[in-house]
């Protein structure tokens, strides 16, 4: 039976941590939120525009236009990542580029590009999901759990 | 156009939630996106995400939370048409385009580009 | 000779007969660019991976230092080298190229002074005549290994530091002219329970303070003995913490002489640099380039460098371990 030891900090350590925290430059949370709001909003507006283009010129329904829209955003992200521009935008925008699907595409593209030097199979293939793995795993697992719960609730007449 | 305004506002707001998780709770980007995906799945299961999509358009479909919602919707839609096994067969039905595009184009990116550092 | 608990005094005063500093694009834009022997425009050095480029950086630093001393690699008994990569691959592969009997070291960013201390010990104890010390770090290679892919769009906080792309080498001998290595204090591993890998400065400051105090205690010296006391890569955040912590412990180092290589190597307005430079090459290139040049001109007569290293790995961080640190101090005098 493994011993579950919670790491307890000594008084000296706690004292030092407070000492260090007081001398730490604080993250500009408000400014970062404003930047994230602005860039995230713009990316969604671009997405909205692309979606409307697909509806108007390709005669897709508003539901099925969502897919090619995502694909276009993915391609744009891969290009920006490849040209070395995306990480600079992201340093400024923070969650504004991480949260939209651009973040997901960037994790895949950046990992794939970086590991080219280890070959296409083990390097690119083996590392592509390094950072995006958690999103897929937890997305699918939580969707699975939620679906089961919904099905049970429906069967019980609750939903 | 009203649709664009709401896309901007709602999309921006979801990103602000993400930024607060990153800076306020000091979560890593991976933890933050996972939190939003799970939230999207739960809201999707409760039927609360679709009204948001109707209202905000891309402001709700572009953020990663929509991924969670689409996974749930796909599973439930397939369950309704083919029964319990549908939960497994349908989960990726709506999101397949996004994931496939990401894999295909990320791979092509690796063929063409070198990291800039 | 051992002095006090953890300090060596090198009675024969081993000489740093030559040294070399090689850097990358960001170092070329920094205030110490003139003190580099070689500066590269990009991270690749004509190689097809970042890791191979780092090996090349070490080879160049070693070869330059040997050439400046008018020696050949056959004259060197031992090579002490280290870096930040898994299994210290750049060092091992550079050692393969040089063909000198090799001792690989790992002290994270403190490796430069660890190496200099050991090299001086070998020469002072007459177990070697000529020892080459070389360390390196590469920004893209270490980001790829320790944090995220280089094109990944994450937002670095203001406490983050920028790993120096470069290599520093020093040739320690029992003859010749040059600054002398007089003492070295070997540090203990200190862990104050900090866990943020984007704030190395705060994690490493206690180790620097512990070693500095041990140095002055063992030698019964005063900070006023030195013209410059420089920490390796605490950066703006860690350096301030260290200074305040030393004052709190009653050891006051005057601001004019208390420096940090991570702060000196980049301009404050250089983008991406955040709190300052880090990496093995930070202390190495600043010391073996800039500081030794100033010593050779007579501007500095007594120098104390305390290189600091954060001993974490990506896995230790994922396993919820805190960040232990170590700091090694070496004094160099004319």
Image (spheres, rainbow, N blue to C red):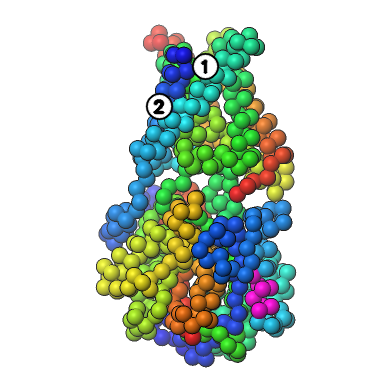
| Residue B15 in sight in this render | no
Seen in the picture, residue C50 relative to A95 is either above or below; the reply is: below
In this figure, which residue is indicated by the disc labeled 1? B73
**Nearer the observer, C116 or A132:** C116
In this figure, which residue is indicated by the disc labeled 2? B13
Q: Where is residue A155 in the image (x, y as percent from the top left)?
A: 44, 10
Secondary structure under the numbered disc 2 in the rendered image: helix
| Residue C45 in sight in this render | yes
Q: Position of residue B69 (x, y in %)?
A: 49, 21
Seen in the picture, residue C84 relative to A62 is either above or below; the reply is: below
Per the rendered image, the range of residues in magenta is: C61-68
Residue C244: image quadrant is bottom left
Q: Where is residue C188 in the image (x, y as percent from the top left)?
A: 42, 70
Q: How many discs appear?
A: 2
Q: Residue at x 67, y 55 (%)?
A: C44
Sequence-wise first label, 2 or 1: 2
Residue C134: image quadrant is bottom right
Q: Closer to us: mark 2 or mark 1?
A: 2
Residue A27: image quadrant is top left
């Amino acid at each position: 039976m493994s011993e579950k030891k919670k790491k307890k900090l000594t008084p000296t350590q706690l004292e030092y941590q407070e000492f260090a925290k007081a001398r730490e430059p604080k993250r500009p949370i408000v400014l970062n939120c404003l930047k994230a709001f602005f860039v995230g909003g713009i990316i969604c507006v671009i997405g909205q525009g692309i979606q409307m283009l697909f509806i108007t010129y390709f005669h897709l329904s508003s539901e099925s236009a969502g897919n090619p829209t995502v694909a276009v955003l993915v391609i744009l992200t891969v290009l920006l990542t490849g040209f070395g521009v995306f990480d600079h935008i992201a340093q400024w925008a923070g969650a504004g580029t991480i949260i939209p699907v651009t973040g997901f595409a960037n994790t895949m593209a950046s990992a794939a590009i970086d590991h080219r030097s280890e070959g296409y199979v083990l390097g690119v293939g083996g590392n592509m999901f390094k950072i995006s793995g958690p999103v897929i795993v937890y997305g699918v697992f939580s969707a699975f759990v939620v679906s089961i719960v919904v099905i049970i609730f429906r069967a019980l007449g609750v939903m | 156009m009203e649709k664009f305004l709401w896309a901007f506002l709602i999309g921006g707001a979801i990103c602000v939630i993400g930024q607060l998780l990153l800076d306020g709770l000091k979560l890593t980007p991976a933890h933050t996106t996972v939190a939003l995906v799970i939230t999207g799945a739960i809201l999707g299961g409760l039927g609360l995400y679709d009204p948001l999509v109707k209202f905000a358009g891309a402001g709700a479909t572009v953020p990663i939370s929509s991924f969670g919602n689409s996974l749930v919707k796909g599973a439930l839609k397939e369950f309704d048409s083919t029964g319990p096994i549908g939960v497994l067969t349908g989960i990726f039905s709506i999101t397949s385009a996004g994931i496939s595009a990401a894999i295909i184009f990320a791979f092509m990116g690796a063929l063409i580009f070198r990291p800039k550092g | 000779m051992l002095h006090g608990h953890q300090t060596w005094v090198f009675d024969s005063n081993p000489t740093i007969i030559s040294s070399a500093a090689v850097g990358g694009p960001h170092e070329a834009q920094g205030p110490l660019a003139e003190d580099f022997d070689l500066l590269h425009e990009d991270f690749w050095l004509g190689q097809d991976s970042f890791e191979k480029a780092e090996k090349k950086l070490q080879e160049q630093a070693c070869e330059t230092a040997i050439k400046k001393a008018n020696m050949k690699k056959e004259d060197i008994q031992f090579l002490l080298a280290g870096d930040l990569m898994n299994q210290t691959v750049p060092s091992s592969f550079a050692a393969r190229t040089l063909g000198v009997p090799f001792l690989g070291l790992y002290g994270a960013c403190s490796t430069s002074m660890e190496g200099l201390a050991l090299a001086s010990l070998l020469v002072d104890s007459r177990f070697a005549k000529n020892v080459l010390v070389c360390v390196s770090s590469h920004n893209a290679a270490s980001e790829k290994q320790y944090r995220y892919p280089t094109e990944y769009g994450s937002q670095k906080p203001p406490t983050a530091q920028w790993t120096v792309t470069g290599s520093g080498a020093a040739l320690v001998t029992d003859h010749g002219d040059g600054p002398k290595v007089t003492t070295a204090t070997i540090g203990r591993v200190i862990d104050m329970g900090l866990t943020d890998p984007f704030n190395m400065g705060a994690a490493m400051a206690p180790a620097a303070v512990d070693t500095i105090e041990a140095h002055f205690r063992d030698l019964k010296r005063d900070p006023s003995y030195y013209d410059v006391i420089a920490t390796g890569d605490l950066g703006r955040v860690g350096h301030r913490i260290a200074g305040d912590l030393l004052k709190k412990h009653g050891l006051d180092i005057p601001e004019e002489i208390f420096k940090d290589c991570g702060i000196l190597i980049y301009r404050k307005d250089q983008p991406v640099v955040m709190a300052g430079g880090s990496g093995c090459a930070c202390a190495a290139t600043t010391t073996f380039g800039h500081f030794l040049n100033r010593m050779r001109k007579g501007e500095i007569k007594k120098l104390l460098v305390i290189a600091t290293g954060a001993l974490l790995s990506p896995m230790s961080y994922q396993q919820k371990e805190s960040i232990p640190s170590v700091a090694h101090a070496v004094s160099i005098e004319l």
